[in-house]
Amino acid sequence: MLRVGLAIAAAVAVIDQLVKWWLIDWLAEPPGFVEVLPFFNLVMVWNRGVSFGLLGDADLAPYLMAGIAGLVVIGLVIWLAGVSERLLAASIGLIIGGALGNIVDRLVYGAVADFVDVHAGGYHWPAFNVADAAITVGVAVMLIDGLLNRRGEPK
């Protein structure tokens, strides 16, 4: 399952970077905002911190966050190497790929490029990107899989 997870991780990281490359170029020009649907916009937001912009003012934050994420990726790859279930391997791959996509942003731009703006009734979810979505879906699938599939039940 290692190959499955790593293939998914590579695909997510590449797609994330390609989408960001295109949107950074396109949204960099004013107005930097495109209404796609009444509840969905494309925007250009640079997240210099962790989730929701936390720690965004620290000079070393991009490198610190990239380093921490890199350690998490290493741990996930080690875990992935021992996985025998396809769904779990896929979910770990999604998380690894998303983390790698955001690591690249931090090292190249000093911040993570976020562009998806979902909103309803005047309330906006914090902007996110393909990598963030992959991480979220990966964690959700992992949690659902863990709740529904009982492996190694106690005797």
Image: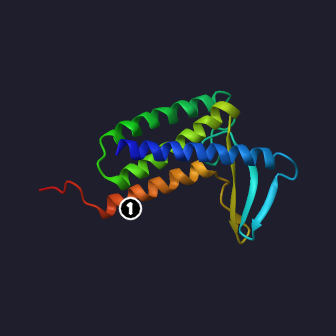
Residue 105 percent coordinates (x, y): 65, 37
- The image quarter containing residue 58 is top right
- The image quarter containing residue 119 is bottom right
Residue 134 percent coordinates (x, y): 53, 52
Q: Nearer the viewer, residue 47 or 91?
A: 91
Residue at 63 percent across and 49 percent down: it is 52
Q: Is residue 16 above or below residue 34?
A: above
Residue 50 percent coordinates (x, y): 60, 42
In the image, farthest residue toward the left: 155
Q: Is residue 60 above or below residue 126?
A: above
Residue at 58 percent across and 50 percent down: it is 132
Q: Nearer the viewer, residue 40 or 84?
A: 84
Residue at 35 percent across and 59 percent down: it is 145
Q: Quadrant of the C terminus?
A: bottom left
Residue beneath disc 1: 144
Task: Give the SS element for disc 1.
Answer: helix
Q: Nearer the viewer, residue 13 or 37?
A: 13
The amino acid on which the numbered mark 1 sits, given as a three-letter code, is Ile
